[in-house]
Amino acid sequence: MIQLRTKIFPSASLKTLYLQSLLTVFFVTLSATAQTNDNARLQMVALDHLAPRAAEVVDIQIDERLLQVATKYLSGSEPDEARVRELVAGLKGIYVKSFEFGEEGVYTEADLNSVRAQLRAPGWSRIIEVRSRREEENVEIYVRTGAEGITGLTVISFAPRELTVINILGAIDLDKLSRLQGQFGIPQLELERGGRAAKPPSRKN
Amino acid sequence: MTKQHQAYMLLLVAMLICAVTRLPVRGNNTNGSGGSSDDGFNTIVKLMETQFHTKRKRSRLMGLAKLGVRIARPRDVRNFKLAIFEEADFSTSDFGTPLRAALKAEWRPLAQVRAREGAEQTYTYLKEDGKNFKILIVNIEPREATVLEVEIPPERLFEWLQNPQKESQSLTDESGDESK
């Protein structure tokens, strides 16, 4: 390999070639890391072990390609379709995992932490945390921001017998989220326009 | 090659391995490469027969079911394929894992709903097929199961994405009702 490289670059010294190679590998690694970090999609497989003990499980996966193709065929002239098209524009994926349990105590803090840990990555920040002691319902909303603005949003909603994680990629804000409720597998979050999370999800779609 | 060169080479190889393994996998999903055919419907019908030791129901009424769905949704549904299984024990904790393993990567999971502690499971997969989309729905209840594959035009895709659970359920119900 060394001989081959020195034949290709006869004027370059071996040491220079090594340095060039090392730099190339460094930048490839850096680029790959940047691409990985650019992905705001959460891994929710750690929650899969809850499925056999759940009374109901809903798992929705809508990727960017599907959203793109679907919106392409929406009419821009029909008011309803134009509204939906505007709503979905900029979204790169919608992923929902929701569990309802017949009893309390099925999921643990460790399960919640498996999701929260990913939301400690650079770019993510928690913007809303609602704890209702009386109703034992909790909602946490995180957004991921980058140079181009908001690039992702995650909602973790949990009550003693319910756990829902919603992960939306792309340009999304709370106003858009409130309008997406009841569609694309996103449960009714009882979000008020303007961004206040009042109640945890209830499936009404 | 001197020891210094060897050390450089080892370092280079190690960094290359790191770089390659960090690169995100594009294109093919690493899950579900086990399907022997790209025909999702036949693959899953065979899987059901093997997994639950049963055979699909053969009935002349199946033709009526197809016709019924065509009439009900003339613009929407094409290439309708339906298999109904009855009188077998379909109570399984999770059919999702073998289902996903059997389907080729081009079939993408859209929705999975498991309700009432295994009493009913509905899996919806989707695949691009030229300009259109193929949708594969597997519905399992304790004593009966349905495998349904339909083709929809891209104009209908948005409705499916907006409410995949409802669309899957209504199509499964329609086909089931028509075949009875």
Image: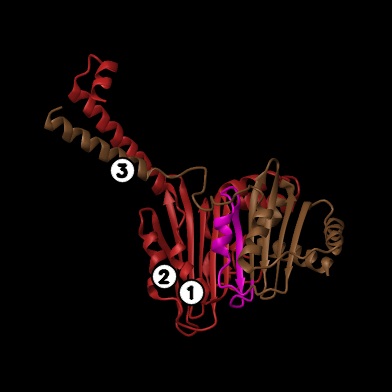
Chain colours: A red, B brown
Q: Which of the two residues, B104 or A57, is positioned nearer the viewer here?
A: B104
Is residue B115 at least partly visible in the picture?
Answer: yes
Q: Which residue is mark 1?
A: A158
Q: Nearer the viewer, residue B167 or B139?
A: B139
Q: Nearer the viewer, residue A162 or B146?
A: B146
Q: Does A184 sit left or right of A33 as displayed?
A: right
Return the mark for residue B13. none
Residue A199 drawn above or below residue A81: below
Residue type at the position of mark 2: Leu
- Residue B74 located left or right of residue A176: right
Residue depicted at 39% across the width and 60% down the height: A119
Give the chain letter at badge 1. A
Is residue B11 rendered to the left or right of residue A122?
left
Mark 1 Cα shell of 10 Å, populated few (<14), some (14-19), many (≥20): many
Residue under circle 2? A112
User: Element type at marker 1?
Assistant: strand
Q: Position of residue A128 (x, y in %)?
A: 45, 67
Answer with the quarter of the image where residue B159 lies.
bottom right
State whether residue B128 is above or below residue B113: above
Which numbered marker is on residue B18? 3
Say if residue A183 shows up in the picture.
no
Q: Position of residue B107 (x, y in %)?
A: 61, 51
Q: Is residue B52 above or below residue A4?
A: below
Q: Amino acid at mark 3?
A: Cys
Picture coordinates of residue A67 (x, y %)? 61, 49
- Disc 1 + disc 2, Cβ < 8 Å: yes
